Image (spheres, rainbow, N blue to C red):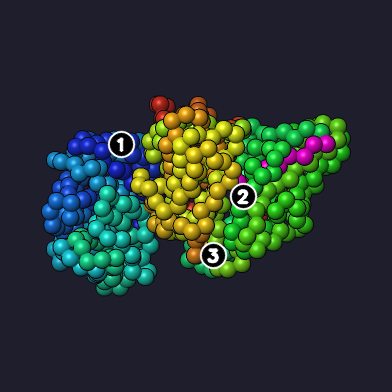
């Protein structure tokens, strides 16, 4: 049986000089191929190497048009049966242009090892380019069962034709690059792009042929999709509420507790119904039942959880909470008498009234964070609060197309004598969302006017800029949300970008599916969350800050039924 080639993994690498190298992981699998797409502004195409061996140009895919900052370049390169494990992917270019050059590295399996590409009149691919134009369409020869891939490098925002799935992309200083996939069709397959204005562009496509099936069949993601999303907040270290006391917990991303509900409220700006609540209790010294409720604008909804006295584990609640699109949400946790209640996880289901799916993002941590005068820092969109002087440690890879909106910030404590700004960042460049604090001002702010259009593969971060010369700006948290039109949402587990992450030594450990990546455990049950509805999981991504192990490291999703 001939298989459809399968895309196992993909990575995006940004060139930072003439000589570049990255640690690239190829998973074990039969009939492998490493396929690398080169895209650039004013940088000549060059063959990358993997584990010291140069990749081969896919004939017919190299295009180079115009000159200077208008110059656009694209090319595809490949290696059959690349060595598995972590090896060096390297690229040397003659000149660089403000880092405006990227590689997309695609790991494929079930690829024909003798004739990996469908013949294109004597070449292995097709391409086109022009100094002006608003559209490009290529029709590579193909067959049913092929995997057709194409890429563009252009000056104006590209939009893929219907039927194509964008599988990566980013922005240059002036320009864009995108990659897309499409199932092969009989005889030929049309792939195309529309550009926002008439400027230089290049476009290259190829059709990958399959070989005998060697990998498990992937899940079918093409069926009917709902509009529910799964909201999980966590901190496996646990947060305690004293006997008979009431604390408040943000609905995303962590179970950090606060005695002030205003500091941990999250804006819910899409009409929706929240239901199917659950809590994981890691320690319980109470002698009476504890109660947890979802609050709307400071009042309990009918969605509650009861935790029996002295019991630990996973507890499921009942009821619903209805938001009209202009309210805030928070968890209220009231411990029973007799001793403290320690929670490690809270979660629920969010179902929007319209046909879109909502992912709530946010950062928080114990206490507040002081930003010194004159600082220019970055934080992650979701996970444990922190800061980084560069964007890379703070970036969230977004694997879906979405609208990114609703930047909301909470300031508490000291202020600075200059303006302070929170701003969305996309692919290392300032984006549209902006919250501004005038000198010596504080409190909460929300950007209700601006949003960002996010493409599959974009890298997202939050920028923190202080113009002050005296006085620290003390922040508590920030939140945003992603809106997806076709039933997909993110589960994000984020560590502080200012830390080294969590050290995993030899052995197996477990982490929650989403929330605050502040702790891990060797006990699988202690990290488990209740899946509230049928869903298909796809595209698991892991960002590694340091890897000094002398053996391979793997991450996987575990399920208990």
Tell me which residue sits at (60%, 34%) in the image. 413
Q: Which residue is mark 1?
A: 22
Q: Which residue is mark 3?
A: 356
Q: Which residues are magenta?
A: 244-253
Q: Position of residue 446 (x, y in %)?
A: 54, 51
Rate crowding at label 2 as few (under 14), some (14 to 19) or many (20 or more) other CA atoms within 10 Å: many
Mark nearer the N terminus (3 vs 2): 2
Q: Position of residue 130 (x, y in %)?
A: 16, 64
Is residue 544 in sight in this rendering? no
Please name which of the two marks, 1 or 2, marks the residue nearer to the observer.
2
Q: Please, what secondary structure does the residue beneath circle 3 have?
A: loop
Specify whether 347 is left or right of 337.
Answer: left
Mark nearer the N terminus (1 vs 2): 1
- 374 and 9: which one is in front? 374
Please name which of the two marks, 1 or 3, marks the residue nearer to the observer.
3
Q: Please, what secondary structure does the residue beneath circle 1 have?
A: strand
Q: What separation in Å lies between label 1 and label 3 (alpha carbons)?
A: 37 Å
Q: Are marks 1 and 2 in contact (CB under 8 Å)?
A: no
Q: Which residue is mark 2?
A: 266
Tell me which residue sits at (54%, 64%) in the image. 356
Rate crowding at label 1 as few (under 14), some (14 to 19) or many (20 or more) other CA atoms within 10 Å: some
Q: How many marks?
A: 3
Specify whether 187 is left or right of 236.
Answer: left
Q: What separation in Å lies between label 3 and label 2 (alpha carbons)?
A: 19 Å
Mark nearer the N terminus (1 vs 3): 1
Q: Quadrant of the N terminus?
A: bottom left
């Amino acid at each position: 049986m001939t298989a459809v080639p399968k895309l196992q993994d993909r990575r995006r690498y940004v060139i930072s000089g003439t000589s570049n190298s990255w640690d690239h992981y190829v998973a074990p699998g039969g009939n492998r191929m490493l396929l690398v797409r080169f895209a650039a502004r004013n940088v000549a195409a060059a063959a990358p190497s993997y584990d010291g061996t140069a990749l081969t140009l896919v004939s017919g895919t190299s295009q180079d048009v115009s000159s200077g900052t208008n110059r656009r370049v694209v090319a595809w390169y490949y290696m059959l049966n690349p060595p598995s494990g972590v090896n060096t992917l390297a690229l040397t270019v003659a000149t660089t242009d403000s880092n405006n050059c990227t590689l997309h590295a695609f790991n494929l399996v079930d690829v024909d090892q003798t004739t990996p590409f469908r013949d294109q009149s004597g070449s292995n691919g097709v391409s086109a380019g022009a100094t002006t134009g608003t559209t490009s369409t290529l029709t590579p020869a193909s067959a049913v069962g092929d995997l057709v891939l194409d890429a563009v490098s252009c000056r104006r925002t590209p939009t893929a034709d219907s039927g194509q799935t964008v599988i990566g992309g980013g922005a240059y200083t002036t320009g864009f690059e995108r990659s897309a996939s499409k199932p092969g069709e009989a005889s030929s397959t049309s792939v195309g792009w529309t550009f926002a204005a008439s400027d230089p562009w290049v476009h290259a496509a190829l059709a990958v042929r399959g070989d005998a099936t060697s990998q498990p069949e992937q899940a079918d993601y093409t069926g009917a999709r709902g509009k529910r999303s799964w909201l999980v907040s966590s901190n496996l270290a646990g947060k305690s509420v004293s006997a008979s006391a009431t604390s408040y917990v943000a609905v995303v991303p962590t179970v950090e507790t606060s005695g002030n509900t205003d500091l941990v409220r999250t804006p819910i700006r899409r009409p929706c119904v929240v239901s199917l609540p659950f809590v994981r209790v890691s320690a319980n010294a109470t002698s009476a039942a504890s109660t947890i409720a979802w609050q709307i604008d400071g009042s309990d909804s009918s969605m509650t959880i009861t935790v029996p006295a002295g019991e630990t584990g996973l507890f499921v609640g009942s009821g619903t909470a209805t938001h009209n699109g202009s309210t805030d949400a928070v968890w209220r946790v009231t411990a029973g008498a007799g001793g403290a209640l320690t929670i490690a996880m809270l979660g629920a289901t969010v179902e929007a009234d319209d046909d879109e799916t909502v992912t709530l993002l946010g950062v928080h941590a114990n206490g507040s964070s002081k930003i010194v005068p004159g600082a220019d820092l970055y934080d992650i969109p979701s996970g444990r609060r922190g800061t980084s002087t560069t964007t890379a440690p703070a970036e969230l890879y977004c694997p879906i197309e979405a609208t990114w909106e609703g930047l909301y910030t909470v300031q508490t404590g000291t202020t600075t004598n200059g303006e302070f700004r929170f701003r969305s960042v996309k692919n290392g460049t300032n984006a549209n969302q902006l919250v501004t604090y005038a000198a010596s001002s504080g409190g909460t702010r929300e950007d209700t006017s601006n949003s960002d259009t996010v493409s599959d593969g974009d890298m997202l971060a939050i920028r923190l800029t202080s113009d002050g010369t005296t006085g620290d700006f003390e922040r508590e948290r920030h939140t945003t949300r992603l809106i997806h039109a076709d039933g997909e949402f993110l589960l994000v587990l984020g560590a502080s970008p200012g830390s080294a992450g969590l050290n995993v030594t030899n052995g197996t450990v477990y982490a929650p599916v989403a929330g605050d990546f502040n702790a891990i455990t060797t006990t699988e049950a202690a990290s488990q969350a209740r899946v509230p509805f049928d869903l298909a999981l796809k595209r698991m991504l892991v960002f590694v800050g340091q890897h000094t192990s002398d053996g391979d490291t793997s991450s996987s999703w575990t399920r208990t039924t």
